[in-house]
Amino acid sequence: MTGSSNDPKRRKELLKHMILQLHDGHAPDAVRAQLVRVLGQVPYDEVVEVEQELIAGGLPIQEVLRLCDVHTAAMKGAISQEGAKSAPPGHPVHAFREENKALARELSELDGLYAAVRATPPDDPARDAAARIRARFNALMDVEKHYLRKEHLLFPILERHGINGPPTVMWGKHDEARRLLGDAIEAVQAAAGATAGELAAVVDLALKPAAEAVAGMIDKEEQILLPMSLDTLTEPEWGEIAAGRAVPGWCLVAPTVEWRPEIAPVPEPGSAPAPAPVPEPGGAPGRIRMPSGALSLDELVGILNVLPVDLSFVDRDDTVRWFTEGARIFPRTRAVIGRKVQFCHPPSSVHVVNEILDAFRAGRQDRASFWIEMRGRFLSIEYFPVRDAGGEYLGCLEVTQDLTAKRALTGQRRLLEWDSRKGGRTDGDHAPA
């Protein structure tokens, strides 16, 4: 280490000071030179800790996002990977890294195509080059699966360990990359018949920023996120990620080896007992355990009753066992519990009810859908067979929805356009009574 104390606390304070200099407008190159001169190489885990401390100290996430790429440029080559762990083939981290290599190859191909466009006389047609660039960007769009696995499998487990800053910042950078990639796809599609000069302008204005966003995220993952994750997560937690990692799919390349966490050996007689496993989140006594989480009874009832649908469940013996009690479309009283479903319908339609249930039991159907218009409202009524993991019929779920307002929607309204004065209502919705 050059000209700096080996005291990690002192080193982090200096790093924090230099990052704040960037936020005050100092040039990245000047700060980087100072960083290398004073600190030499900074361990990747200290970069994470400093970022977390800055956010906890009040530095707005949006400000961190705004200058995240400046931080990366300033610290490029100054983050030490000494002591970083490796991951075996098939491991979630190995899969992330292989995908990053595939993404980097696409980016390299794009650089070559950009150079070819610039070397072409400006007035020459560039239809073939535009098609090749578009193909590379179509491949880059596969990065969405990579980002989804990070957001929904890796980030939640990092947060269990109190690591909140980097996942929050990275998710923001994912969204930036998504927006830039969408803009790039639109731009290169519009440039299908462009000249080389016109295509070169599109490259500079829309395509390079998107490619640089993907490249920047690769660097952040390889330098900080993945080494930190290997240091932080336990073997069972990596097993949890491995079990669900293919849910969003793979980005460009799929693992050829299946990885599983090592199973702890059975202790020999007389040996010390193995440490107690860390309880899973939501594992408190009194909570209803499900494969995807755990809820208290109050939480479960509250969730079911706030759903914008009416739900009713009839068991395998055609007996009504449960229904939601929120603002129902069709009122229902608790007196119906324990009643045969056939007695809940007029005699003229009972034969249809029996046909539906018989088809569900026999496995011939997996849905029965109906819709009606009543008093100016458009209502959807659907029935679904409920089965256990082995396919055994457990009963029938009725789902009723008022789709009147949804049917009238046009255009789009995104999350960031939410208006607190109107809440989540659309113009066709009714305010709560």
Image (tube, grey):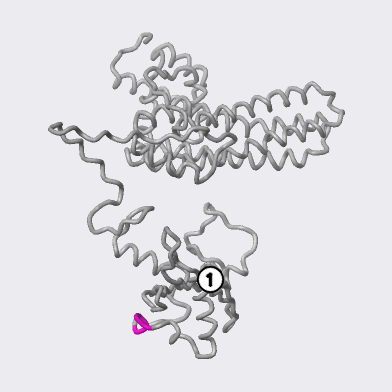
**Nearest to the observer: residue 265 or residue 285:** 265
Give the percent coordinates (x, y) of residue 337. 35, 80
Residue 67 % position (x, y): 50, 31
Q: Nearer the viewer, residue 128 or 343?
A: 343
Is residue 326 in sight in this rendering? no
Give how far across and how far down residue 300 sits, in percent.
34, 63
* The N terminus: image quadrant: top left
Q: Is residue 383 visible?
A: yes
Q: Tell me the kind of residue under disc 1.
A: Asp
Q: Residue 22 location, x and y as percent?
A: 47, 26
Q: Which range of residues does the magenta coloring cover?
A: 335-339
Write the residue at 68% across / 24% down: 111
Residue 208 is a magenta residue: no
**Which residue occupies the extreme bottom position in the image?**
347
Q: Which residue is mark 1?
A: 429
Q: Is residue 237 left or right of residue 90?
A: left
What element does badge 1 sit on? Answer: loop
Q: Name the residue nearer the viewer: 304 or 27.
A: 304
**Residue drawn at point x = 30 percent, y = 46 percent:** 280
Main secondary structure of the magenta stretch: loop
Q: Residues within 10 Å of mark 1 (few under 14, many from 20)?
A: few
- Please determine whether, in this image, residue 159 is positioned above or below residue 293: above
Q: Quadrant of residue 178?
A: top right
- The C terminus lies in which quarter of the figure? bottom left
Q: Is residue 249 left or right of residue 48?
A: right
| Residue at 51 percent of width and 66 percent of height | 425
